[in-house]
Amino acid sequence: MPAFGVVDGVQQGTVECAHTAPYYFFGKNEAFAFDCAIPFGMNSRQLTAWMYEGNGMQLMREFYAQYSIINFPMGNTGAQMGGWYRKEITSVADLNGLKMRIGGFGGRVLSKLGGVPQNIPGGEIYQSLEKGTIDATEWVGPYDDLKLGFHKVAPFYYYPGWWEGGAQLSLYVNDKAFNGLSNEYKSILRQAASDAHVVMQAKYDARNPTALKQLIAEGAKLARFPREVMDAAFKARNEVYAELNDKNPNWKKIYADYSRFLADQYQWAPIAEGSFDQYMAAQKL
């Protein structure tokens, strides 16, 4: 089944379940993106907290009921990188006309900054960069990016990927198929998805540092996005969200809760772990 056909497939019962990145389906309804990542949204731990201990699971289950889907969080990459660029990004002006392969919802914000989002399958990205068909691409992070060799044709590697502070994957299960399971099998499915959720993040956290060292050794030029670029993107994000609040009732309902949870998290996050991480990063380990 084509990757972008899984929502229809699960909804119609053509397949009973699918593992996917929900933000790919924001074209159906922008609210799908809450189950994965939205620009300048929650990081992976915050999103997991919202889903399991906040109102996230309840709100998403209500939304997915329209599609005959029951969702389960099933993996997270953590905060992703800001992508690979053929030329340096020193100001917002450098984004004007920039043709960038960018997945999910981030392209809508990039458009407000003058960028030109491109939807290109993974297997075609390298050639597109090499030929200059596109000027930049985002993918995931060092571990996955190294395997695709983007640094050989677009050496400027920026961070952070403000459109994916913690990209969550989900298991979609057809509601009739799930409700037809025994309580024991329902429990097994929940626990298996939860285990995969934990293991995926652990693998990325373990493998990204070594991959980043190798990328730099092979010529990648690591840099942080200029503050000007981040501020402009954040402003554009707010404009997009205001537009969605006016026209999409599903978005408005979920975002009201999501944004409150996010604000509370960032009152807490810098105090304990944030300050601890900042201190440790400055030490000679």
Image (cartoon, helix red, strand yellow):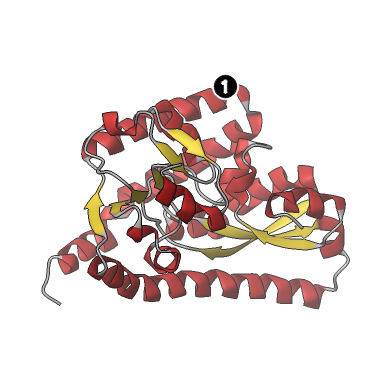
Whether 218 is drawn above or below 105: the answer is below
Q: Quadrant of residue 227?
A: top left
Residue at the spot of label 1: 246
| Residue 218 point in image, percent of width and height | 27, 68
- The quadrant the N terminus occupies is bottom right
Which of the two residues, 213 or 60, is positioned nearer the viewer here? 213
Q: Considering the numbered disc 1 on the image, is that residue within a helix, a strand or a loop?
A: helix
Q: Residue at x 39, y 42 (%)?
A: 135
Q: Nearer the viewer, residue 62 or 109?
A: 109
Q: Quadrant of the C terminus?
A: bottom left
Residue 45 location (% of width, % of height):
44, 60
Tell me: 87 left or right of 204: left
Q: Who's the residue at 52% across and 23% down the image? A: 243
Total tally of numbered discs in the picture: 1
Q: Residue 169 versus residue 58: which sits nearer the camera?
A: 169
Seen at 68% across and 70% down, the residue is: 190
Residue 146 point in image, percent of width and height: 39, 67
Q: Nearer the viewer, residue 220 or 202?
A: 220
The residue most toward the front is 131
Residue beneath the point at 58% across and 75% down: 195
Amino acid type, label 1: Asp
Quadrant housing residue 78? bottom left
**Circle 1 residues within 10 Å: few <14, some 14–19, many ≥20:** few
